[in-house]
Image (cartoon, rainbow, N blue to C red):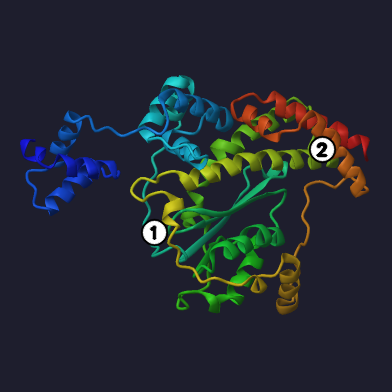
Amino acid sequence: MAALESHTNLITSLFNTGLTHAQIASTLQQMNILPCSEMSVRRFCARHELKRKRQLSDQALERAVAGSIYETGPSYGRKFMTGYLSSMGLHAGEGRVGRILRELHQPYHEFRREGARNLNPVPYHVEYMGHKLHLDQNEKLVMFGVTHVLAVDGYSSKIVAHSTMPVKNNLVIYEEIYRPAVMNHGMWDQVRVDHDREFYLCLYMQEKLSQHRRNLSRPPYLQTTSTRNLRVERLWPEVNNRVNYPLKQALVHLLDQEAVSLEDNLTRFCISNLTCQVSQIGLNRVVQSWNAHRIPGRGIPNELSANRCLTEVSEELLPCASVVANMYEQDLGSSLTWVSTFGTDPFSSEEDRIHAEQDFAIDYPDMSLLFNQVVNGDHTPFQDALISLMNVTERYV
């Protein structure tokens, strides 16, 4: 300790630059200042009252976490909650966030502990951002007309595109997933999907643009079983717990009470319409949190993706879905389903649709409030909103 006293100004300067105790010790060792273990630096800092300045007071952090719990529900633990706060510009350590989560809502803390699962590591090789792009769909709410699709970079684990749709559809997935992912980031060497048909249009364009990739020695795409599409499969439990299961409980309860019937086309259309909108809010929050949270042993997806190694592609090479669908059908002689709906669209005109949406918005101007309540176990507001939407729709058909 005494040997460090003559270097007080240097250590203080290093500390103020944001270096950790271990990094300060390493720097001093490189300067041949001994002894300077991490523990001796830590004791020196404590003696000289060198403490990190917190960006948020405990009270401010408690308020932020309390508001975020209302928006995200019980499933966000310290890592995901820290990521969610970070995505909103609020930065705090995982330890502080975890302590506040435990203190603010003990039942939710116990819920997370009981639901913890051990994941066995599976070997996975990827060299850089732009090596592999994983696409997959989630159909936990398929019986209610809701399907989620994600695109995840294999190196950084960043979710680079996501969408929610009533029924999985080649044109929608290309337009809302593959096209924006490539336009915003560049061409991946390889796209990985399962053996389902909804990715055919994406694979068609991936092969058509294969000469624009960084590494031409790899096949432009690979179809595998779902269990081997690991980077994106890993995310679905997070989405299910934080978005799908709370909504599914609310909808199943309505079916059990025979308050709605999926045999009715208007009911199917309204259930799909409302649930897609509400679940998209939850999915957006999961994506923001995931991309900003720290993955143990790897880092933060947003930061890992900063140094991407993708070849940029001009917008002219990525036409809209209708143009690509025509190219696909002409080149391959196969037909695609251009529009997929859940139930039958009951509106005879666009004017009727607009009037119905305006009437519904008077009573429910903010869909995020419905998600906030259902994810915290209060199903009634979402269920009431669905019944209201069905009644409003009936007036205009």
| Res 267 label | 2
Q: Position of residue 188 (x, y in %)?
A: 51, 67
Percent from the top left, x then y, of residue 335?
Answer: 76, 69
**Identity of the residue drawn at 13% across and 37% down:** 40
- Find disc 1 in the rendering and name its residue: 124
- Element carrying mark 1: loop
Q: Which disc, if any, is residue 325?
A: none
> Looking at the picture, does residue 347 appear above or below residue 255?
below
Frontmost residue, 76 versus 227: 76
Nearer to the camera, 292 or 88? 88
Tag 1: amino acid: Tyr
Which one is nearer the viewer's eye here, 136 or 364?
A: 364
Dot 1 and dot 2 residues touching (CB under 8 Å):
no
Q: Quadrant of the N terminus?
A: top left
Q: Which residue is rendered at x = 53% and y = 28% of the image?
A: 69
> Around disc 1, counting alpha carbons within 10 Å, would you say few (fewer than 14), some (14 to 19), or many (20 or more)?
few
Disc 2 residue type (three-letter) = Thr
Which residue corresponds to the image point at 76% horizontal and 33% vertical from the top-left? 365
- The residue at 78%/27% (across/down) is 258
Horizontally, residue 165 falls left or right of residue 69, namely right
Quadrant, the C terminus: top right
Would you say 374 lies left or right of 79 here? right
* Percent of width and height locating residue 35: 7, 43
Q: Earlier in the sequence, mark 1 or mark 2?
A: 1
